Image: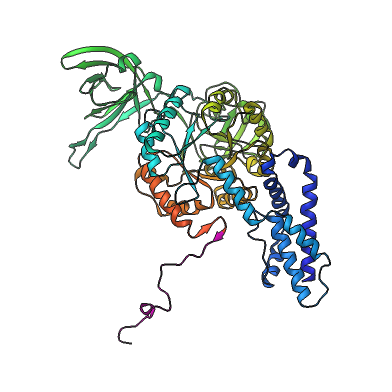
Amino acid sequence: MHALDAELADIERHLRRVEARLARSLALVESNWTESARNLVHYTALRQLDLRELQLLLQQHGLSSLGRSESFVMASLLEVRMRIAEALRGRREAGPKDLAELNERGAGALSWQMAEFLLHSHTRAAFGSKPRGRHVAVMVTAPSAAEADRAWLGRLMRAGMNVLRINCAHEGPSEWSRILDALEAARRDTDLECRVLMDLAGPKIRTGPIADGVRVATWKVEHDALGKVVAPARVVLRPGTRAAEAAETPVLLLDDERFATIRKGDVLHFRDTRGRRRRLTVCQVGRHEAVAETRRRAYVTERTRYTHRRGKRSLWRGTAGIAGVPGNAIELAVGNALVLSGRDIEGRPARGNKAAVIACTAPDALHGVQAGHRVLFDDGKIETIVERVDGPDLHLRVLRTSRPLVKLRAEKGINLPDSHLSIGALTDEDRTNLAFVAGHADLVGLSFVRSPADVAALHAVLGQTPIGIVLKIETRAGFENLPRILLEAMRRPPVAVMIARGDLAVELGFERLAEVQEEILWLCEASHVPAIWATQVLDGLARTGVPSRAEVTDAAASVAAECVMLNKGPYVEDAVRTLVDILRRMERHHYKKRSIFRKLRVSAWTEPHAEMTIAGG
C-alpha cells in the first residue's frame, strides 16, 4: 500500500509538471473551457505512462484502477490516494502525513459530476438541445439541392435528424441557399430544431486526367430467360449546367434552354455508336431532372446528335453530352511500376518499357514525399511504395491491390500517410466559401486538419463570427497531433471532433481502425469535446433498405459518441429511424465506457420457468 501511494504520488507530480510546462497554452483557452483543457493535459500526460501493472495492483486492493478516469483525471487519482491513506490509518500504520492536504486538493479537482456537466453543455452548444429520449444526436448528409426539398427535410426531422450536413465540395452558394431555405420551412412545419454543419472541401489530392479517354454511356435493358424485355433502361436527363452533380447512373446532358422545354411523353431520337436507331421516351419531368426510358440497349458518347419530337412535330435538333461515366483508366497489378507526377500532364497507361504515368492535382503535396514512403490511391485500393524521387516525379512500385487487376481513373483520392505535407487545410476555394458558410451555418467542418496551425488559420478567417468548428480527423497527422489541435480549438469554442473513419482506415490501416477510434473517443471525453461517429453508419440500409449484421453492431457501438452521421441514400429516412431506435436502446446499457446495469429481460434463476426439466429424465 505504501509503495502504491508512492507510485501514485510520482504520477501526480508528473501530471502537474506537464501542466506547468503548458501553462502558456492553457492561459489562452476560453475561460469556460479552462478546466476541460487542464483535464486534457492531465489525461495525455497520464497516457504517456504504462500503467498496466499498477492497475492490476490497485484492483487487487479493491481500489479504482483509473480505467474510467478520462473526464476527471486528477480527482480520480487523488481519490485513490485518499482511500489508501484512510486504509493505512485504519490499520494504525503510518500513512501519508498530508491526508488533510490530499482532501483539500481532491475537493478542488474537477469532479465526475462537473465533468459530465461540461461535456453535456459543450454538446448542446454544438448540436442544439438534447434530443427527446436520447443524448446522442443524429446528423444526415444532404443530397443535391433538387432532392433536399422542404418535404424531404421535414420527413428526416420527424424521423429524428438533429443536424443537417452540407458538403461544400458539391454544388455552390445558390444550391446551398435553396437547401437552407427548405430547411427553414421544414423547421416551421415540424416545430423541431435542426442545426447545420457545412463541411469545407479542403485540399483535394487526387489523380489528374488521363489522355485518350473516350467516355461511353451504356443503357442496359433487362430481359427474362427467353430474351423478352421485362424492364426498360431508365435514362436520367439533366441541363448541362448540372453536369457536376453526383449521379448513380450515366446521365444525358441537354442544353439548358432545350431541357426547359421537355414534357412528359416527348421522344428523343438518336443513333448510338453502332449507328443503330434508338428512341428515349420521357416518363417523368422535374425542375432540374427528367427520366426517360428505352426498350433497346444503346451505347452513347459525347456530342451525340438527337431530334426532340412531340407527337408528329420535331421541336429541336441538338447535341447531347454525358456525365456520370468513368473515363479512360490505367490498369495496374502487383509489381507494376507507376510514375506519380507533379507536372501538368495527362496520364497514360504503360507502353512497352515505359511505366504508366498519372498526375497529381495538388503537386505541392508531393514535396515532402521521400523514397520508402507509401502512396495510396482510390481509398486504399492500390498501395504503392516510392522507389525513387526524380524532381517532380515519384517512381512507385505497386505493393497491393484490391483485386488481381485494378483500374486507376482520374479524380481518385491520393493518400500520403508517411509524408509531411506542407499544404494547409484551408484552400483558396475554402476561404471564398467561408464568406457564405459563416453567415448561414451553425458549424463549419475543417477537413484534413493536421496541426494547430490549420485551426489557427481558420480562426483568423472567422474572427468573431459566432460559429462552431468541427475538427475532421481523417489523416495520420491529425490523429497524432489531436491533443495540441484540441487545445488550439478551445481558444474559440464551440468545438466538436468528427472521427472520419474511412480516411483514417486508409491512412493508418484497417487493422488499426478500432483502436484509433477508441483513442479519439477517449481524448474527446478527456477534453469534454463532443465526438461525431462518421463514415458508412448503416450504409447498406440507407442505400438498399436492408442492413447487414455488422453495420447494426457498428451503429450500436456509436452510442459512445455524442453524434452519429449518416450519409445520403434512397432509404436514409428508414436508416434514421433505425439508428434512433438503436441509440435509445443502447443508452440504457452504456454511457461512454461505463456499462449501465438496467434489469435484463431474461429468465431469472428465482423464477419457476427457469428450471430445466429433461424429458424422460
Looking at the picture, tell me which residue is in the foreground, 397 or 459.
Answer: 459
**Residue 154 horizontal/vertical position (percent):** 37, 37
* Residue 551 relative to residue 5: left or right: left
Q: Say how many tags the image has.
A: 0
Q: Is residue 482 magenta?
A: no
Q: Quadrant of residue 342?
A: top right
Q: Position of residue 382 (x, y in %)?
A: 52, 39
Please tell me in which quadrant of the rendered image residue 206 appears.
top right
| Direction from residue 552 to residue 365 in the image, left or right | right
Answer above or below: position of 190 versus 214. Answer: below
Image point 72% across, 55% down: which residue? 109
**Above or below for 319 versus 139:** above
Q: Residue furthest bottom?
A: 617
The reply to whether residue 133 is visible in this rendering is yes
Residue at the spot x=51%, y=28% of the render?
A: 440
Towards the viewer: 182 or 258: 182
Quadrant holding the N terminus: bottom right
Is 221 in front, or is 44?
44
Quadrant where the C terminus sits is bottom left
Q: Position of residue 604 (x, y in %)?
A: 42, 75
**Along the viewing direction, whichever of 468 and 143 lies nearer the viewer:** 468
The part of the image, by quadrant, that contains residue 225 is top left
The answer to whether residue 167 is left or right of residue 287 is right
Q: Is the magenta region chiefly helix, strand or loop?
A: loop
Residue 49 visible (yes or no): no
Magenta extent: 594-617
The colour scheme of the drawn protein is rainbow
Image location of residue 353, percent across then percent down: 55, 30
